[in-house]
Image: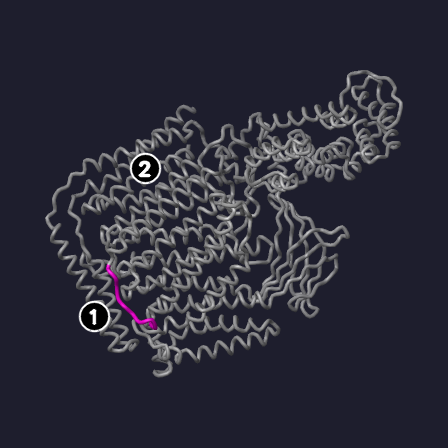
Amino acid sequence: MIIEIGHYALVLALATALILSVLPVIGARRGDAAMMALAPTGSLVLFALVAFSFGVLTWAYVVSDFSVANVWENSHSLMPLIYKYSGVWGNHEGSMLLWLLILVFFSALVATFGRNLPDTLRANVLAVQAWISTAFLFFILLTSNPFLRLDPAPAEGQDLNPVLQDLGLAVHPPLLYLGYVGFSVCFSFAVAALIEGRIDAAWARWVRPWTLAAWTFLTAGIAMGSYWAYYELGWGGWWFWDPVENASFMPWLAGTALLHSALVMEKREALKIWTVLLAIMTFSLSLLGTFLVRSGVLTSVHSFATDPTRGIFILCILGIFIGGAFALFAWRAPMLKAGGIFAPISREGALVLNNLILTVATATVLTGTLYPLILETLTGEKISVGAPFFNMTFGLLMLPLLVAVPFGPVLAWKRGDLLGALQRLYVFAGLALAAGLAFFYIQNGGPVLAIFGLVLGFWGMIGAFADLWYRANFAKVGLSVGLKRLAGLPRSVFGTAIAHFGLGVTVLGIFAATTFGTETVVEMKQGASVDIGGYSLTYDGLRDAVGPNYTEQRGHFAVSRGGVQVADVWSSKRLYTARRMPTTEAGILTFGLSQLYVSLGDAMESGGMVVRIWWKPFILCIWGGALVMMVGGFVSLSDRRLRVGAPSRKAKPVKARLEAAE
Amino acid sequence: MQYWATMVLWIILAALTAAVAAILILPFARATKAASVDRAGEVAVYRDQLAELDRDRAQGLINAEEAEYARAEIGRRLLAAAGAGAGEGRETAAPKARKHALATTAVTMVPPVIGLCLYLALGNPGLPDQPLEARLANPGNNVALLVAKAERHLAENPNDGAGWDLLAPIYFRSMRLGDAELAYRNAIRILGPNPLRLAGLGETLVASNDGIVTEDARAAFEQAVKLDPDNPRSRFYVGLGFEQAGRAAEARAQFEAIAKGSPPDAPWMQLVNQHIAKNGGTITPGRDTAQAPGNPSQADVAAAENLSQGDRQAMIRGMVDSLAERLKQEPNNLEGWVRLVRSYAVLGDKPKAQEALKSGLKQFPSSGELVALANEMGLAVEGVAQ
């Protein structure tokens, strides 16, 4: 009965979303307060219904109710409890429901915290959110319904795909979706502004917290996915330019551009039209990513079960929303008033450069991802566009951007002084160069290009603080006054510095891991040793072990340095009994920021084992940098300036209670 | 009981619908004031920007000239917003009572109509929840549930040999060969080898290898024969192993030993005699009615070897078709699908193999085994995997 109530709640959510799609828009046109007031109330109802429905599905997983087809297909009664929870979104139907849940969650957030918005804007934004919700509710109910039943119910489930039986599944999709779907709010704001035909600097400030939140979650989601692929797939790589990875990376690039252009718009009311376009593009890329992954156009771990009607359905959603938004843009954008002007060398100029490079980079990734698909559809020819293409094009594009990052914050608005900025930065550039050379000297022996990469990384890390240094003005006013001035700076300045520092850390990790890392593939017999990265690994044979729903052979390696044993690594090959599917579990050992990565290959007839061993120096910097970027995002999000704009409707001073979360 | 549960469900659904409609109608019930087309929010943003400018100026972060420019710019925006707000505010200042007949009708009608229509089309109101624990507590005579219950028991007490002993033949009969092998091995490990378990393990291995007596299987049968020399079933497979290895003399010795040890009217004599003949021996006349020892399907395969090419094809074909029929009834059997696809492919019936692959993948969409098999057999996965 509970399951049927959950199913009905989802149907009722569709009815609510339909009402929300129409009435508030009419209300906004007519200036009808009651109809506009329906938007926030209805959004909360919608969220409550979908959340209840999601809760019911989760319950079905936890109690292993195999009369629900979705549970039977993707669960097993003996699975550890955590995977029963995360298994809810470890399949197509459930992950779409999670997508929807996060979408209506953001609507509810806008409804709750958007009191400072003008009534019409809020009504329109929530209505556009409801359009998207309606589309996905139809999609879920008609093509991917997780509440379909089986009668009679089977006795045992078919188990969750073993690759997905990992803590990564519990964290990666929700974070990624918070990012993907968070950009829907920016999209709705853009479409609402186009509907109203009016857009100004205040709009940019209202959109900023949503952009920032979505960007922060997406950063974390991508980093998490990358780390998961790194340790779960056993291939030793952390980014494969796989179409599915690109699908999440493109909204990130566009979103990063949006974050920066909204800044210009907020401060100078320039780049209005461009910002609106970026907001539409970012969410369109999120939708495109959803389409690529969910339609079965691509086969990968993410595709789960595929079905052509779903692909066509998502393609329709994609066409209606992207096409509709761009049509609206083409019609309305020329009516928007242009904003402030600026010289090429200025903070705005630097941000425009950032935007140019990021959008071109997005276009490059988009081309590399879609070209093979289009070519295969048209001619049937199969080609793969791999890492060399992306490294050459995308990598080269990123270099000037990375050089330019520290310049942005130290340039003045409107009219900047490049010479002055250079003068201010040369000390930092010198420091970065010295640090890069020192690093190279310590690691000793990479190609010459590596120095450049390392310097670039340190440049990003050290240069990030140039702005803080000069704003605090330590050189002139001394330490104590400087610190006081530093404390008085808005949090977003710190957010910027931290995020840029994180970018530098990631760049450093990428260059260090790729240039100083080593790889060995050897056949090892029991007792054999291999030297790598200054450590010595001794193979100690295979042992059998049994997990809750798998059996495994674990290879044991003793790791020693200078003759002293320092650690053990276990690397195993598992067989998941329900699906009879083998997986490899890499053994990973962390030394500081570096890692030793051991992956078992096939057993040889001679009794040996093929073992792949990687030494990956400073690899943790790659994801650590992303985490630092995320922290920067949150710091910036906590800036009190994002909370203003609460109209003095009740003529009371703005309190920092509810507004804090905006 | 069931009837009452359904009634309660419908009452809850009705209450839920009414609650949603009631909440959505609330904004209309409140006093309808005209919307303030206010731009107060915007004004507040610009005020804050001015305040920030002052802070920056006070801290010396920007110079006086820059600050003046910025102040003028923000001031212009502030004036525009405040002016527009006042102007528009005046236009709609007079609140006129609006009638929302159409809107309220929509809000009250859409949830029940859409909810009912769509739910009746998609839902299963009569089907109760079936949490596994509750079902296991009361399994009735549902074999699948009983097996699941035994599996749970064994997961907690993996050293209960009797449990494995019980499950193994059930697995074997329901074609879960991998599980059967594991169960037999566990039973042998815990309870020690006996002829029945060893023969069962051997047969499982033969079945998983498409009728070939592998090294492992032969070892199991030989051990069974050692423990119980009179067991015709194990002997037969030992002989079959020799025969498949091309060691005709040893094979014949085994078959002849079976014939000697069996009553002449034993149901397996015809089959044994065929194999004696095949390996160059002479047959002692026996009864006509032939029945395979132990597992009939394996013996059928053996019998098929003696038939003419056409007959053999027909016989194998019949067996494969019966497997297909069984899978149609009970599709939840990955190994069955793998065997079916392989069989059709080996028989050279590509369309059927393709069809079986499609049905199998539909049932087990993420089965790497099926995909690997398809690649091995040169079947297209792309069209199927859609």
Q: Nearer the viewer, mark 1 or mark 2?
A: 1
State how the image is colored. Answer: one colour
Say which chain tag 2 marks: A
Q: Quadrant of residue B371?
A: top right
Identify the disc placed on residue A599.
none
At which x and y percent is residue B168?
68, 33
Q: Considering only vertical position in the picture, is A38 above or below A418? A: above
Q: Which residues are magenta?
A: A337-346
Q: Residue at x 18, y 35 (%)?
A: B101
Q: Nearer the viewer, residue A159 or B206?
A: B206
Asked if residue B96 can be seen in this view, the reply is: yes
Residue, far front = A379
Assign a secondary structure to mark 2.
Answer: helix
Q: Which residue is mark 2?
A: A15
Asked if residue A111 can be seen in this view, the reply is: no
- Residue type (three-letter) at the residue carrying disc 2: Ala
Q: Residue at x 39, y 45 (%)?
A: A318
Left or right: A265 with respect to B132?
left
What type of secondary structure mainly makes up the magenta span? loop
Q: Residue at x 49, y 31 (%)?
A: A150
Left or right: A249 with respect to B40?
right
Q: Disc 1 and disc 2: Cα gap in Å?
A: 49 Å
Left or right: B373 with respect to A121?
right
Q: Nearer the viewer, residue B328 or B205?
A: B328
Left or right: B265 with respect to A249?
right
Q: Quadrant of the N terminus of chain B?
A: top left
Structural crowding at the residue carrying mark 1, measured as other residues with C-alpha within 10 Å and reported as few (<14), some (14–19) or many (≥20): few
Q: Is residue A345 magenta?
A: yes
Q: Which residue is mark 1?
A: B72
Q: Is residue B68 magenta?
A: no
Say which chain tag 1 marks: B
